[in-house]
Image: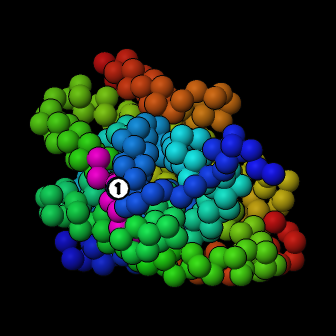
Amino acid sequence: METEAAQQQAPHPPAGLGELFWGFFTIGARAFGGVLPWAHRVMVEERRWLAPAEFAEILALCQFLPGPNVGNMSIVLGRRWCGLPGALSAFLGLMALPFCWVLALAMLYAEHASNPVVRTVVTSVGVAAAGLFIGTALKLGRPLARKPAGVALVLACFAAVGLARVSLLAVLPVAAVLALLASRRGWL
Amino acid sequence: MLELAAYFALLSLVAVGGIAPVMPEMQRVVVEAKGWMEAEEFTQLFAVSQAAPGPNVLITSLIGWKVAGIAGALLALAAFCLPAAVLAWGVGSLWDRFRDAPWRKVTQRALVPVTVGLILAGGYVLATPAGLDWKNALIAGASAAALYLTKLNPLWILAGGAIAGAVLYS
C-alpha cells in the first residue's frame, strides 16, 4: 500500500506548459558554472518531475545524440510531457535568459575592449576556460590511459585538428571508422 | 551570415558530446578560413560565453552577433540547435528500443577517444591565440590541473585566470 508520503515522493510530470517553461527558465537562470547540475537539481530534487534513474537515462540519450546536451534534454522531455508546444517551451525557457545575459556581457565587454588591461584579463579568462577543456579531456580520458589504441586515437585527433588544423569534417569520418573498429575488437 | 548558419547547422549534427568537441573546428572556420575575427577575439568571446551563466552552446550566438548583430546571434544559435533538436525529437521515442543494443555500447566506447582528442585540441587552440607563449601555457596548465585535481567550482578557476592574467601581463 502506498503511503501518502510515498505518493508525495513519487515524481510527477509538470502540470502544463507554464510550469515546464518556468522550470527550464530557472535552470537557465541559475546555471552559473554549468547547466547540468542545475538541471538535476530542478527536475529531480526541487520539482520532482523525474526520478533520479529516469534523469540518468535521459541524460545518457542526450549525450549520445549530437548537439547541446541539456538543450536536447529540453526537447526530449518537453515532447514527452506536452508534445511540440512542450519541446518549444522547454527549449525557449532554457535559453531565454542565458541568451540575454551572454549578449549583454559581450556588449559590455565590447565597450571596454579598447582598454588593454580589460582585454588582457578577458583573454586570460578565455585561456583559463581553455584549460578547463584540457582538464575535462583528462578526466574523460583517464580510463583510456592503459589502452594503447585509445591513446593513439586521442593523440591522432588532437594532432590533426589542433596542430595541423585539418577540417573536422575530414577528420571525423576517418576517426569514427578507426574508433569503431578498435571498439569492436575490444581495444577501447 | 547564411554561410555561417549553414555551417553551424552541419556542425550541429557532428557535435557528439556537446559543443566542446567542435570548438576547434569553429575556431578554424571563423578565424583561419573566413577571417571573421582575430584568434584573440575568438578566445575573448569564448571567455565571455564560459563566464556567463547558461549552456555553453551560447558561444554560437556570440559568433553570430560578431558577424551580423542580434539577428546573427539568434540565427547562429538556432542553426546550431535545430538540426540536433529535430534528431532528438525523432530519436527520443526510439531510445527504449536500442538502449541495450550491443552496437550502442560499441559506439559509445568508440566515441570516447575521439571526443577526448577533439576537446584537447579545442583547449590547445583556444589557449594559444597568439601562438605558444609561456604565460598563457601557465594559466591554461594551472586551470587544467585545478579542474583535474580539486573540486573547485570552475567559476573560481576562471576568476583565478583573470587575476593571473592581470598579474602576469602587467
- Location of residue A34 in the rendering, given as x and y in whole percent from the top left corner: 49, 43
Q: Nearest the camera: B44 or A61?
A: A61
Prevailing secondary structure of the magenta residues: helix
Q: Nearest the camera: B166 or A44?
A: A44
Q: Which residues are magenta?
A: A87-97
Q: Name the residue at 67% across, 58% down.
A: A54
The residue tagged with tag 1: helix, strand or loop?
Answer: helix
Can residue B21 be spotted in the picture?
Answer: no
Q: Name the residue at 16% across, 29% down.
A: A115
Count of numbered tags: 1
How many residues crowd around disc 1 within 10 Å: few (fewer than 14), some, or many (20 or more)? few
Q: Is residue B46 left or right of residue B66?
A: right
Q: Is residue A91 above or below residue B88?
A: above
Where, by quadrant of the figure, is residue B27 drawn?
A: bottom left
Q: Which residue is mark 1?
A: A18
Residue B163 belongs to the span the image colors magenta: no
- Location of residue A87 in the rendering, given as x and y in whole percent from the top left corner: 41, 68
Under mark 1, the amino acid is Gly
Q: Nearest the camera: B90 or A125?
A: B90
Q: Is residue B126 left or right of residue B60?
A: right
Can residue B166 be spotted in the picture?
Answer: yes
Chain containing mark 1: A
Where, by quadrant of the figure, is residue B119 drawn?
A: bottom right
Q: Nearest the camera: A188 or A51?
A: A51
Q: Quadrant of the C terminus of chain B?
A: top left
Q: Name the residue at 28% across, 58% down.
A: B61
